Image (cartoon, rainbow, N blue to C red):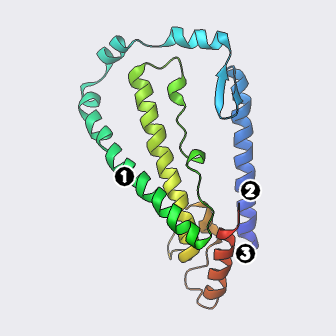
Amino acid sequence: MTRPIDSILARIDALGDELEQAIAERRQTFEYEMRGRRARFTAEAQARHRALRVSLRVFLSQTKFAHVVTAPVIYSLILPFALLDLFVTVYQAICFRAYGIPRVRRADHIRIDRHMLAYLNAVQKLNCVYCGYCNGLISYVREIGARTEAFWCPIKHAGPVRHPHRQYAQFMDYGDADGFQKGLQASRRAVTRDE
């Protein structure tokens, strides 16, 4: 890996840390703290949240017709998402063990916690559960795919890739035939290390 790439990755890590610190500071503004993986609001904040909840009757009366008729289309994706979850979980359970790649923890990607917010009504809570699961699943699958790609084909594409996964920056350059075998072995060693 080249030094400019190392420098960029270090800056990305620093920005990630800075972002997490800014989010942590905002927790105080919204009167909650993290205890393990759960948010705990003050009693005053919880009371304020309950008072701000829009009733289900009012919410549904204000919902656009287009949102109602497209909801079944959105929710129909739960079946392919659940199948994807099952298949990719089985895939990594079998293949990652065989390759020596550390398994991706679902809990690091799939967070379902927004339904605990007292200012959301039942429909909003259901939507938040669905989005938390589906978007978390995509993140989970992306990380499994990234580790797989780093093990089998760690070569950058010829053209630019928008928002590549974390492993991509360390892949070998497209057209680097001389460095391919050495780079492949280095990538496999890197991805099979415990992170």
> Picture coordinates of residue 194 (x, y %)?
71, 63
Label ID, residue 2:
3
Residue 176 or residue 160, whichever sits in front: 176
Q: Circle 2 is placed at which residue position?
A: 11
Residue that appears at 57% across and 66% down: 147
Q: Amino acid at mark 1?
A: Leu
Count how many numbered circles sit on residues in the image: 3
Residue 128 or residue 178, whichever sits in front: 128
Say which element carries label 1.
helix
Q: Please determine whether, in this image, residue 184 is positioned above or below residue 69.
A: below
> Picture coordinates of residue 73 (x, y %)?
27, 40
Q: Label 3: few (<14), some or many (≥20) within 10 Å?
A: few
Q: Please determine whether, in this image, residue 150 is positioned above or below residue 69.
A: below
> Picture coordinates of residue 28 (x, y %)?
73, 23
Q: Amino acid at mark 2?
A: Arg
Q: CA distance from mark 1 to mark 2?
A: 37 Å
Left or right of residue 70: residue 78: right
Q: Circle 1 is placed at which residue position?
A: 83
Q: Earlier in the sequence, mark 1 or mark 3?
A: 3
Q: Label 1: few (<14), some or many (≥20) within 10 Å?
A: few
Residue 145 or residue 88, whichever sits in front: 88
